[in-house]
Image (spheres, helix red, strand yellow):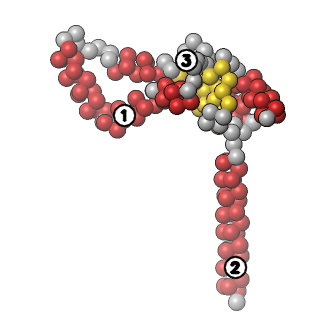
């Protein structure tokens, strides 16, 4: 009897833990996603502040692709065939998956800009393109504008 009671208590604790974890995941789904498309010329501020408010923020710098190409192309021979061989060795050493991942990450801002139909930057995109604010790099200001827009809907 004592063993059964202990198992029931253990089961109850496990169910409470699962309920807690499930409620945490539900809350996480309700967070607002912000994608920021910018460049080195337009540094973004207020990221941590809006994250503390519950927003999930991803910043994509359009200059990352140029930086990656410059880094990979460092110290290449002037001869095109020799440069090609050096690049092939570098890519082989890094691994195909790693090279693809670096390029995808570096150009993700360009991909998102096209996907969302953005016409300029900096752009702060809320909820996968539901709302876009152009020309603002202070995320606190962008969130306030977004909230104003929501209240008028």
Q: Is residue 59 left or right of residue 102?
A: right
Q: Earlier in the sequence, mark 3 or mark 2?
A: 2
Q: What quarter of the picture does the N terminus occupy?
A: bottom right
Q: Quadrant of residue 91?
A: top left
Placement of 60 over or under 127, stated as above or below: above
Measuring 37% from the left and 19% from the top, which residue is drawn there? 69
x, y percent for residue 112: 52, 30
Residues 32 and 131: in front is: 131
Mark 2, other Cα within 10 Å: few <14 / some 14–19 / many ≥20? few
Measuring 69% from the left and 79% from the top, which residue is drawn there? 8
From the image, tell me which residue sits under label 2: 8
Q: Earlier in the sequence, mark 1 or mark 3?
A: 3
Label pair 2/1, CB-CB below 8 angstroms: no
Residues 103 and 151: in front is: 151
From the image, tell me which residue sits under label 3: 39
Placement of 103 over or under 119, stated as above or below: below
Q: Is residue 108 left or right of residue 71?
A: right
Residues 93 and 70: in front is: 70
From the image, tell me which residue sits under label 1: 100
Q: Earlier in the sequence, mark 2 or mark 1?
A: 2
């Amino acid at each position: 009897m004592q063993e059964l009671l202990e198992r029931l208590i253990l089961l109850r604790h496990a169910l409470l833990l699962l309920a807690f974890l499930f409620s945490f995941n539900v809350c996480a789904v309700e967070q607002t996603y912000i994608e920021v498309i910018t460049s080195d010329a337009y540094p973004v501020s207020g990221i941590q502040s809006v994250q503390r408010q519950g927003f999930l923020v991803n910043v994509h710098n359009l200059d990352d692709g140029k930086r990656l190409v410059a880094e990979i192309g460092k110290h290449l021979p002037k001869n095109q065939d020799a440069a090609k061989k050096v690049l092939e060795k570098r890519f082989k050493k890094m691994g195909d998956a790693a090279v693809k991942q670096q390029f995808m990450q570096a150009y993700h801002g360009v991909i998102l800009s096209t996907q969302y139909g953005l016409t300029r930057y900096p752009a702060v995109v809320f909820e996968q393109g539901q709302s876009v604010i152009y020309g603002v790099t202070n995320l606190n200001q962008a969130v306030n504008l977004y909230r104003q827009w929501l209240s008028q809907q």
